[in-house]
Image: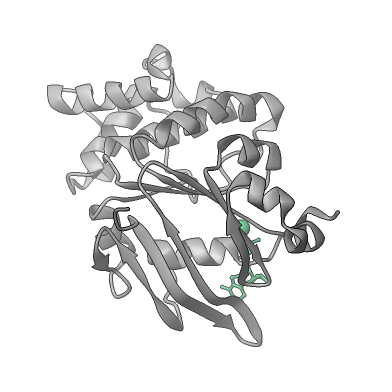
């Protein structure tokens, strides 16, 4: 088997008396959706922030694409292809769907894109933006104002913006949050197809979505990974059922 694209070794993080991450080891392999589940406060977002570089671990290492990225910043990891979505909504609400996607693609070139309106004149950028929109079924809304989209459609657009940067890995913290049943249903096949563009580390509390999507699941409880396995293995794991699934 080839080396995993992302691997985390012995990652720990303490906030005062609280051990938010406790010696976490996990990896994400090519082509997979690796779901990270666990109760509220288990340390999922803390782990994601350490992987993306927003929080420095007390101990442990993060390896991405064959390199120890632990000392690198969020921006440096992003440039290497670590694509993060859903933490902050960075969409320009008055711009069209296509303009937002082109802005995303421009951002990947390091342009100071916040200081001018998108001109939509760069054919290569527009083509890349349209391709990304098509991947999330949003090309049909290319000329729509972003403010007029549904919540779920904005999530799809955020994914398209991330896609324009052609990431090697997606890290998503609760992409289904606030979408309701129909938004979750729309997003599920889109995420499923994305694993072939880049594998996904997916934090998600909607268990139906997790069971439908995940190739592997890691279960985090009180900052510790208590189990990693396939959907069937996790569903059958006695410790997981007791600690998390409440059975
Ligand atoms: P999850 O995403 O699994 O719900 P978090 O990673 O957000 O959990 O939080 C894990 C624990 O760490 C929680 O008890 C939370 O209150 C605490 N925590 C998170 N960030 C900070 C911080 N910056 N300072 C202090 N405590 C924090
Ligand atoms: Mg969280």
Q: Looking at the image, which residue is at 73% across and 59% down?
A: 240
| Residue 116 falls left or right of residue 140 | left
**Can residue 145 be seen by looking at this rendering?**
yes
| Residue 119 falls left or right of residue 94 | left
Q: Looking at the image, which residue is at 38% across and 66% down?
A: 53
Task: Look at the picture and state if 123 lies above or below 68.
Answer: above
**Can residue 92 be seen by looking at this rendering?**
no
- Position in image of residue 108 (x %, y %): 22, 44
Q: Looking at the image, which residue is at 21% across and 38% down?
A: 106
Query: How are the residues colored?
Result: one colour
- In this rendered view, identify the residue nearer to me: 165 or 42: 42
Classify residue 20 by image quadrant: bottom right
| Residue 28 falls left or right of residue 36 | left
Ligand 1 lies in quarter: bottom right
Task: Look at the picture and state if 114 lies above or below 150.
Answer: below
Q: Looking at the image, which residue is at 42% across and 64% down?
A: 51
- Position in image of residue 3 (x %, y %): 30, 58
């Amino acid at each position: 088997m080839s080396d995993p694209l992302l691997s985390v070794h012995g990652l720990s993080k303490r906030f005062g008396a609280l051990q938010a991450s406790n010696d976490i080891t996990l990896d994400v392999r090519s082509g997979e959706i690796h779901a990270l589940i666990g109760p509220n406060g288990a340390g999922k977002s803390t782990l994601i922030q350490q992987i993306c570089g927003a929080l420095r671990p007390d101990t442990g290492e993060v390896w991405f694409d064959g390199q120890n990225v632990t000392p690198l910043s969020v921006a440096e990891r992003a440039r290497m292809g670590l694509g993060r979505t859903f933490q902050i909504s960075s969409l320009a609400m008055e711009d069209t769907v296509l303009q937002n996607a082109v802005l995303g693609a421009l951002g990947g070139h390091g342009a100071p894109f916040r200081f001018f309106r998108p001109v939509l004149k760069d054919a290569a950028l527009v083509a890349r933006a349209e391709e990304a929109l098509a991947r999330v079924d949003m090309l049909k809304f290319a000329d729509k104002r972003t403010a007029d989209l549904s919540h779920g459609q904005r999530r799809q657009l955020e994914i398209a913006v991330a896609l324009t940067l052609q990431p090697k890995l997606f890290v998503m913290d609760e992409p289904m949050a606030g979408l309701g049943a129909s938004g979750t249903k729309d997003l599920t096949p889109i995420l499923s197809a994305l694993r072939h563009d880049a594998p996904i580390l997916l934090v998600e509390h909607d268990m139906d979505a997790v069971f439908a999507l995940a190739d592997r699941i890691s279960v985090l409880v009180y900052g510790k990974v208590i189990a990693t396995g396939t959907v069937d293995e996790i569903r059958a794991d006695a410790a997981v059922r007791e600690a998390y699934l409440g059975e």
